[in-house]
Image (cartoon, helix red, strand yellow):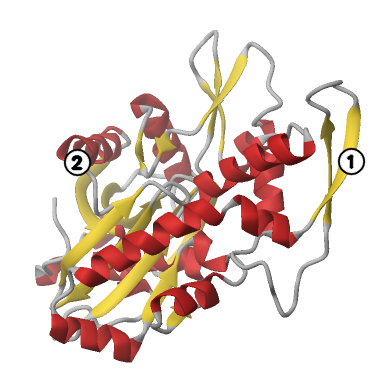
Amino acid sequence: MGLFSFLTQDLAMDLGTANTLIVHNGKVVVNEPSIVAIDRNTNKTIAIGEVARQMHGKTHENIKTVRPLKDGVIADFEAAEQMIRGMIKMIPSKSRLFTPTLRMVIGIPSGSTEVEVRAVRDSADQAGSREVYLIHEPMAAALGIGIDVEAPVGNMVVDIGGGTTEIAVIALGGIVNNCSIRIAGDEFTEDIQQYMRQQHNLRVGERTAEEIKIKVGSALTNLENPPEDLNVRGPNLMTALPIEVAVNYEEVAHAIDKSIMKIEAAIMNVLEQTPPELYADIVSNGIFLTGGGALLRGLDLRLKNKINIEFNVAESPLLAVVRGTGVAIKNIGRGVPYLFR
């Protein structure tokens, strides 16, 4: 570190569809929902993160809540800039005498187009970053769970986030082949909302569907330790009168089955394109599951039964990508192949 290194603040960011996390000095200092509340009259930001999430679905005509990212990429440029700027301000600072210049590493989906990459870079620039480095999310996830990505060994990572599922085979510091599909946690939530409408004539909001997914969500219809049924209240679609329905894990498994089948097909597609020597390494090491979707009950077992390869759920899967970006930022000076600008 140089004499004036304190003038530069290194930040690693996982800019996710559902949550945004920031690592500073090796610690996760910000972990907030990726949502912004904006005053429609003045166009000013009222709240960011958890406070804005609590407003979601409960606002009046003068306030709108915006999720700046959709399917893993920036859908609302201005809201994304305000969110990044606001979350940077949440970082505890020892000194308020000056604002240090920022150097950032941001995780992006491996299937991002040049336009989508530029949107992330420009948003970070507008939020005050002097240098912006990017890393593909499956590579960051591999770094975050302790895989030696520069070794001549093949490893496969499946990162199921909020907007995208990232599948990649990694070796020698690069991505050998990959697939990025826009089927992930948000799609599961929409599936549950649709199921509740069709099977129970019950209209539920995004937050309630998310709660169902977390509390009784499952990838299998037969679990050894099933969760208790969840009572869900809401208006009847036909009469608008309030009704209460007990939802069990088997129903959720049926609701999200088609989306999980698409993830299975994408994993099989990547495996088909994997060179034989790397395929052998993957069979030996197993496939690593990261991201919020990895927490879905029974998902690892279902994938193992389908693909006949061991699936390992990472420790703290939600933090894998941001921890990996934190590792990457320490290696900027080494000129590692997995960072680009």
Instruction: Identify the image quadrant of residue 244.
Output: top right
* In the rendered image, the vertical position of residue 255 relative to residue 38, given as above or below: below
Nearest-to-viewer mark from 2 and 1: 1
* In the rendered image, the vertical position of residue 148 relative to residue 174, given as above or below: below
Residue nearest the viewer, comparing 162 with 80? 162
* Residue depicted at 46% across the width and 73% down the height: 303
* In the rendered image, the vertical position of residue 264 relative to residue 30, given as above or below: below
What is the three-letter code of the residue carrying label 1?
A: Glu
Q: Is residue 92 visible?
A: no
Instruction: Identify the image quadrant of residue 217.
Output: bottom right
Mark 2 residue element = loop
Residue to which mark 2 is pinned: 113
Q: Please identify the quadrant where the N terminus is shown.
A: bottom left
Q: Is residue 271 visible?
A: yes
**Residue 321: mark in rendering:** none
Mark 2 burial class by Cα count in 10 Å: few <14, some 14-19, many 20+ = few
* Residue depicted at 78% across the width and 34% down the height: 202
What is the three-letter code of the residue carrying label 2?
A: Thr
Circle nearer the N terminus (2, 1): 2
* Residue depicted at 71% across the width and 51% down the height: 212
Mark 1 burial class by Cα count in 10 Å: few <14, some 14-19, many 20+ = few
* Residue depicted at 49% across the width and 58% down the height: 260
